[in-house]
């Protein structure tokens, strides 16, 4: 299970602004990272998806300020090869992201990976004073953005491989998956 949280306030005003500013929708914005992991490491593509099921108890689809989007969404993708992946995203869930590995037979949790770590959290006040009113998730993801930028620059300047960075083919397939899933999940949550 991949869980991605942002730290918007759960108010009509703040979510309306969020929906307008991110009008491409949650799957092509906030949850695109988790979908890229699914594409890269689990063989997810539009052609390989056997089923997708929204968790109706967890998820919420709203229309605010003329924009319809998810403020919370959890769903399971099952591929034609039988691979099962759960993805959850919550616009008002906090500042963390989590990867949870479970045993396929028992459902027992085997491992949990979270970000940000304590060092990153401790650096947030410094970044807030330096950059002011940036979105809170920029502060929690600062070390990752820096690493990503360095990998890409080293690739362009010195020709070093940007290992671990999604290439254009992954990006295109991930967007295709997001566009495929959005109307299906919206329909399931009506």
Image: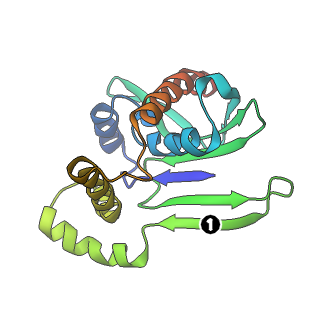
Quarter of the image for residue 73 reads top right
Q: Residue at x 32, y 28 (%)?
A: 65
Q: In this orientation, does residue 49 appear?
A: yes
Q: Position of residue 19 (x, y in %)?
A: 35, 34
Foreground pick, 32 / 190: 32
Does 56 appear above or below 100? above
Along the viewing direction, whichever of 92 and 116 lies nearer the viewer: 116
Quarter of the picture holding the C terminus: top right
Residue 16, given in percent of the width and then of the height, sits at 32, 36
Name above or below for residue 77 compared with residue 93: above
Relative horizontal placement of residue 62, taking residue 152 as reference (left or right) = right
139 above or below 170? Answer: below
Label 1: how many Cα within 10 Å (few below 14, some 14–19, many 20+):
few
Circle 1: element type: strand
Q: Position of residue 57 (x, y in %)?
A: 66, 42
Q: Residue furthest front?
A: 159
Question: On the rendered structure, is 93 left or right of 105?
Answer: left
Rendered residue at 34%/23% (across/down)? 66
Residue occupying image coordinates x 67% and y 67%: 111
Residue carrying label 1: 112
Say which quarter of the image contains residue 185. top right
Q: Is residue 133 left or right of residue 81?
A: left
User: Can the viewer see residue 190?
Assistant: no
Between 109 and 38, the one nearer to me in the picture: 38
């Amino acid at each position: 299970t991949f869980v991605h949280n942002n730290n918007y306030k759960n108010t009509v005003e703040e979510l309306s602004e969020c929906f307008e500013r991110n009008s491409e929708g949650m799957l092509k914005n906030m949850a695109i990272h988790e979908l890229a992991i699914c594409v890269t490491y689990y063989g997810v593509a539009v052609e390989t998806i056997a089923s997708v099921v929204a968790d109706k108890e967890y998820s919420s689809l709203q229309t605010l300020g003329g924009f319809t989007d998810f403020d919370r969404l959890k769903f399971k993708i099952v591929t034609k090869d039988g691979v099962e992946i759960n993805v959850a995203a919550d616009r008002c869930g906090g500042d963390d992201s989590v990867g949870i590995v479970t045993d396929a037979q028992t459902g027992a949790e085997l491992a949990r990976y979270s970000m940000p770590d304590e060092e990153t959290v401790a650096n947030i006040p410094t970044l807030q004073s330096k950059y002011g009113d940036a979105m809170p998730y920029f502060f929690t993801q600062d070390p990752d953005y820096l690493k990503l930028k360095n990998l890409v620059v080293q690739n362009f300047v010195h020709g070093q491989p940007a290992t671990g960075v999604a290439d254009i083919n992954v990006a295109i397939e991930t967007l295709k998956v997001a566009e495929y899933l959005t109307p299906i999940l919206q329909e399931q949550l009506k």
